[in-house]
Image (spheres, rainbow, N blue to C red):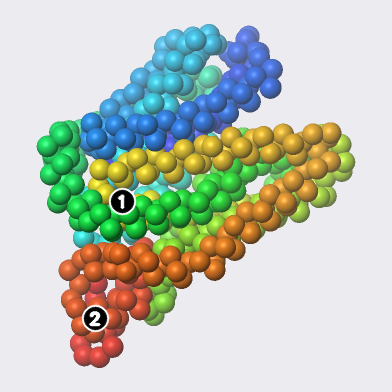
Amino acid sequence: MVAFAELWERASFYSIVSLLAIFAVAPRDQGGMGISKIEANLWAGNYTLMAFGLPIIFGLIGDRILGHYRAVVLGAAIIVSGHAVLFIGDPTNGSILWMALWLIASGTGLLKPAMPCIVSSFYDEDQVGRDRAFKFYYMMINIGAVLGAGVVGMIHTAWGFEWAFLWAGLGMLVAMALLLAARPLVPAIERGRPTKASVLAGEVLDPIAADRRRFKINTTMLCTLFALFLVWSLAYGFFAGSATSELIGKSYVDRVVLGWEFPAEFLYMIEPGIIVIATPLLAWGLSMLARRGRFPDPVYQMVLGALLACAAVMLLGWLVTGVPEGAKNAPVIALASFIGAYAFMSVGEILIAPVYMAVITRLAPRRQQGTWQGAMLLGIGLMSFGVSRVSAVAEADGGVRRAETFIVTGLIALVVVGAFVLASPWIVRIIRRANGNQMIGDAPVGEELEALAQLDAGEPAIGVKVEPLSGDSHSE
């Protein structure tokens, strides 16, 4: 139910992102706005910043005023209303288009940061189940992204812009109805509106909020890991948060497959498509490591994800070295190599984004979790906005500094990640000392506890069977 709603939120976002610039530059006699490419890029960039920036504000509202379930339902309703405005109104009118985009972005701001909090609430002390759920929850996000990028183009071709703008809203309407019907299944703590008394009582009962030392340590560690998350967000900006890789793919990648040149819009499907395929494979590999007692701590997963992201940016820079100077259209980059760069970034994304979501639900007080989830999205939005400026520098003078800019940016990010490689054992020890017993929950003490300590005190993302040092086996 929760994942289905998140699927349609992403379908909504990717439908708008992939269609907005095309709609903006399309002539008026074809149903578009008929504006320049520069103006179209501004529209698309502003919407992306809205969609990723507003969640930090609305995440706080969900935490403190509405409650997470109410924020999700209200956010879904606002997203539906935004799509309805695009269908019923005249989106070629700038004011109407702005109103619709603000509604969709505001609904996203309410829904998206509250959703992981509801996912976490279903698992209580079951940290193994929680982290496994986040891996597959993130896969559902990217199924929605594939649908949004792929289906909207076909609907636009067959029936025009109006129906293309509406379709994801209809899906969200169905998801909202399911959310309302499934309300009794939502844990009671997430269902109601948090009054001042309930917030204060919750903070007293919340072991993190009640323990000031633990709260300070956890907040410091969340801020530290947020810096690592921003490094990945930089790579995300190159590959999915801006038009950088899509423009490169459209002009310089050989898109001919079996004699057919597929549309450039299909490039939006590469990143979420790889994630949908890779997530079950990665989950299987991690479960194998877990059975052998070698499951990596979430901090180490995040570091590896950031390393892969840096490699992806530098590989993109290396690929464009083959583009002739000043060429506006030269399909000299092999499709397999281009997808390979996406693969580095996408696997890194699986290792860092859902893992950080789960870490937030473990280290942050309950009434701050939505705000932290919003901060994640704000970080992506800001870094994507910055990448758009970096890409402008790269494309200056016919793109003579394109490869140099990408490679240097990747190397700078790699230096930051290198510092985290050195510091990660220290970060893990601090988190374990502050949260070890509480995060293990009802696990028995003694030899089983010692065996768990040798694995991941932050709890693994896939089910772990722990073999004690001696005696009978114990499964968590």
Looking at the rendered structure, the kind of residue marked 1 is Ala
Q: Is residue 355 visible?
A: yes
Q: Nearer the viewer, residue 2 or 262?
A: 2
Please give the residue where the numbered disc 2 appears in the rendered image: 448
Give the structural element (helix, strand or loop) at label 2.
helix
Q: Is residue 393 above or below residue 408?
A: above
Residue at x 28% of width, y 64% of height = 435
| Residue 300 image point, x, y percent | 47, 66
Where is the N terminus found, in terms of image quarters?
A: top left
Q: Which residue is mark 1?
A: 364
> Is 357 in front, or is 244?
357
Q: Position of residue 396 (x, y in %)?
A: 79, 34
Amino acid type, residue under disc 2 in the picture: Glu
Contact check, label 2 and label 1, Cβ < 8 Å: no
Q: Is residue 367 left or right of residue 387?
A: left
Quarter in which the C terminus is drawn: bottom left
Q: Give residue 199's quadrant in the image.
A: top left
Q: Residue at point 65% right, 13% down?
A: 34
Q: Position of residue 17 (x, y in %)?
A: 54, 30
The circle on residue 27 is none
Depicted 361 relative to depicted 473: above or below: above
Describe residue 320's horizontal placement relative to residue 474 as left or right.
right
Is 448 rendered above or below residue 233?
below
Q: CA distance from mark 2 to mark 1?
A: 27 Å
Find residue 36 and report its horizontal and vertical position in percent: 69, 17
**In this image, 311 relative to 103: left or right?**
right
The residue sitting at 52% across, 26% down in the picture is 47
